[in-house]
Amino acid sequence: MDIIDRENSGRVINVSGAEIGGGAFTLIAGPCAIESREQLFAAADGVKAAGAELLRGGAFKPRTSPHDFQGLGAEGIRLLLEARERTGLPVVTEIVDPRQIPLFEQVDLIQVGARNMQNYELLKELGHVDKPVLLKRGLASTIKELLMAAEYIMAGGNERIILCERGIRTFETATRSTLDLSAVPVLHEKSGLPVLVDPSHAMGAARFVPPMALAAVAAGADGLLIEVHADPAHALSDGAQALRPEEFAQLAEQARQIRRIVRG
Amino acid sequence: MDIIDRENSGRVINVSGAEIGGGAFTLIAGPCAIESREQLFAAADGVKAAGAELLRGGAFKPRTSPHDFQGLGAEGIRLLLEARERTGLPVVTEIVDPRQIPLFEQVDLIQVGARNMQNYELLKELGHVDKPVLLKRGLASTIKELLMAAEYIMAGGNERIILCERGIRTFETATRSTLDLSAVPVLHEKSGLPVLVDPSHAMGAARFVPPMALAAVAAGADGLLIEVHADPAHALSDGAQALRPEEFAQLAEQARQIRRIVRG
Amino acid sequence: MDIIDRENSGRVINVSGAEIGGGAFTLIAGPCAIESREQLFAAADGVKAAGAELLRGGAFKPRTSPHDFQGLGAEGIRLLLEARERTGLPVVTEIVDPRQIPLFEQVDLIQVGARNMQNYELLKELGHVDKPVLLKRGLASTIKELLMAAEYIMAGGNERIILCERGIRTFETATRSTLDLSAVPVLHEKSGLPVLVDPSHAMGAARFVPPMALAAVAAGADGLLIEVHADPAHALSDGAQALRPEEFAQLAEQARQIRRIVRG
Amino acid sequence: MDIIDRENSGRVINVSGAEIGGGAFTLIAGPCAIESREQLFAAADGVKAAGAELLRGGAFKPRTSPHDFQGLGAEGIRLLLEARERTGLPVVTEIVDPRQIPLFEQVDLIQVGARNMQNYELLKELGHVDKPVLLKRGLASTIKELLMAAEYIMAGGNERIILCERGIRTFETATRSTLDLSAVPVLHEKSGLPVLVDPSHAMGAARFVPPMALAAVAAGADGLLIEVHADPAHALSDGAQALRPEEFAQLAEQARQIRRIVRG
């Protein structure tokens, strides 16, 4: 399964100044969904203070039910760019339709979510975009399929791809999904692309996020995606899994300590 | 989980004259991918002779690897419409991008494949199209998520939805996927929408298709999707699972006999 | 994976006069757990009248919680033998410990349940017993592992083994487990041993048992295991999935009709 | 699901002087199977030198195929007790049949393997034994079922139970099983029993063991079970996943460093 060019092995991807892979350790944090300027700025200030390298926030939210909050859309992206101005952090947000690409012109890193990992038309378009792509593993996608999805982007010429494990679907129901940390060393071996881990979506409960985030670092992840909200109890989307800024700051400190141990 | 209007229960969906649901039993057959006029016509003549009600054929093929045959695209749809002219059978083919909708103007039934079951932007667009939609269950989607995906289409006003079980992903590797026939009675109970079963993709081997097709009928399916190819050994896509026209004819006969027993 | 001697292919196993495999079609029915003489006899009379070939009833019940009813034990077996006397039907019941073998001396068919499919010490002992064994697939066992478990029994000299599919564990929670009917043709191809299906445990709800039982027959199963209780609402174990005798009689009739279609 | 007495929460279990749980961090290491005195002693000396607290070694080996090496049996236990004499390390080994209990009289910690997690007759017997039990999670057992299995032992009066996550069965085939590290914080929350992790069996490949072992520690595991063999290439059982003593020593050092970070 040597489907990714081994010359890419271990290389660093530069995201508007922030480095991912190649020995760097990168924290990406922010709210699941952008709800308002006030909410976004509160989270952004918190993650900046805690030393995160990138700011995340969802403008287009794919939700299982059409009756759930679907995100602020283009307005959300505008707010995210304001938050970048304010904090100096590059930003990452999710795309769900190839027709949205023009809206992402100012975005630093484009995320493809788990549900769209095999939306090949979207992947093909992103192969022609001059921006790095954060590609999340589908809930029921094998490691091989994730690499094949990366191939769809690479086939168009865009090789700046960052992979992300975010939990797979199993029979276990005690957690929302099962975080497959084995994917970290396996993906490193097979592709050399940077591998991040998002424990927030996988666990679905904030109290389980820190142990699994630290486990991801110990397993060799090149960084973490963490949901942070200044007021989780009133979040419009997935509040139960968001850390408060001070919890994130403590996690970030422990994560960097473990990183130093595993990287020697 | 009463998310689907029970008034729809058991109603029939008319697809350019062919009936699906409401007591009808419907066979949809044809090649996985349209490869050429000759190949398509050979299969179309065979399925017509065997009494199929609709002709299927893929023009846009989502494949796990970008290096596999991706289908003939718009030219494939043109050939499919020629085959309809020739056989009189309404046609169904898969859409993979909302921008393709204009190409499907003449198509009788639009299929959403397993990989796009949670491509919500595509589903939303199909909610505004005046055509029935065949919605396949994702490989790792729960029954509830399939119904929620149907809701995305219905929310736009299009209630002509036909559900399709095509195998789920499990730990078992002896078959390509595990056909979850339990979904048939469960979906009927929860939604009242017609439920078809596609055993060809689930099994991945032609010799296992007839027993599982008959099992689907016994479980109460409103019809079957069967891959038929006049020369499976030379198919460009999934040939190993295609029946020859004469095998399909025999299956169709047994399927209708079993249907009579289970419907009294 | 040619681990089972192909000379066994399709051969019939004689269980005290009842035939299983080799073209025969066999219905095994009775209560999940034996609760009392009255309860057992009511069910036994019902399944006898409906034409079942064997009577089932659990004396030793492996339950997930130690606080649930664990069965009547040796007394249950005595009642089961009385019911055999009364109805003339051979009986099958589950063993959970190799030390129980002497208690099963009069039993016609010894069942190994899903939880003990890889209890190798038990399997080895059953290899030396002069009785047929009904071996159920484990909830998370592959088809290959089921055949390997059969090998453990055969290695001791006992080749009278009947396999049984009873549902596997998947991510789907709408049914208790996912009945993997694909296992029927695959097991037939790989082993030639008789393959029964138990839809009662897989579905966990009586209303879903008939469609899945019929589907199993259409898929080629050599017979069915069906839970029958004269008063399901008051059953001590798994009452929700038990059919009443008259429901079983109707199912038996339809099952035999479908059997005739698929066997020509 | 408050099935375990919360008064047990976080308590320490004393295994012949070695502590497990209650803040202790415990390394258990040794060969998968005991093959000979020489092989066992080489591994035992290595794990002792690296600072392991207990020595493991399998005498009775449940193997998927009856034709694979099944262990040395009683002779294996005698060799293990010799190795205890030599190193001073308490020993743990697996039981597979209730009739073997007398053979385990001198063993310090009795292991119940994944395949026997729902062998309730065995669990019941262990409820009456005055020894701690190491209970491994079944390959397809939920966290709730693991706790219920522990209940079977506790119901007999033996509350000295240590839980162990060793990988669950999922659709992913890149690793032998999927190590579910989420189980660590969830089991701690639900039971307060000590939780160990065995990454060797889960990964099936030695090069993936260290990252997953460290991840387990970061997730909060109370200790690790690691397979160590002085000559993995010639091991009779699962050699591909065994670490050499010097690799284990390095892992042990990093594991203790991470433990200090996560326990503050």
Image: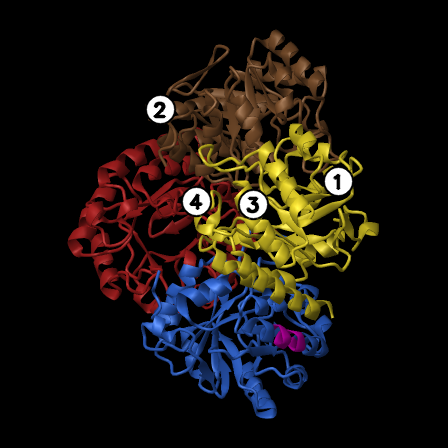
Chain colours: A yellow, B brown, C red, D blue
- Which label lies toward us, 1 or 4? 1
**Magenta part of the chain:** D252-258
Measured in 3D between alpha carbons, the distance from the residue under mark 1 to the one under mark 2, in whole angstroms, is: 48 Å
Determine which residue is flagged by label 4.
C21
Q: Does label 3 or label 1 sit earlier along the sequence?
A: 3
**Are callouts 3 and 4 both on one chain?**
no
- For disc 2, the marked residue is B9
Occupied quadrant, residue C33: bottom left
Residue lying at 41% horizontally and 21% vertically, measured from the top left: B21
Report the residue marked by disc 1.
A131
Can you name the residue that lies furthest to the left here? C38
**Mark 4 to mark 2 CA distance (whole Å):** 40 Å
- CA–CA distance between discs 3 and 1? 23 Å
Which marked residue is nearer to the observer: mark 3 or mark 1? 3
Please state the horizontal and vertical placement of residue A173, each as a whole percent of the image.
45, 52
SS at badge 3: helix
Going by the numbered disc 2, the residue's amino acid type is Ser
Residue under numbered circle 3: A40
Residue C170 in view (yes/no): no
Which element is circle 4 on? loop
Of A194 and D211, nearer the camera is: A194
Q: How many numbered dots are placed on residues in this image?
A: 4
- Circle 2/circle 3 CB separation < 8 Å: no
Q: Quadrant of the C terminus of chain D?
A: bottom right
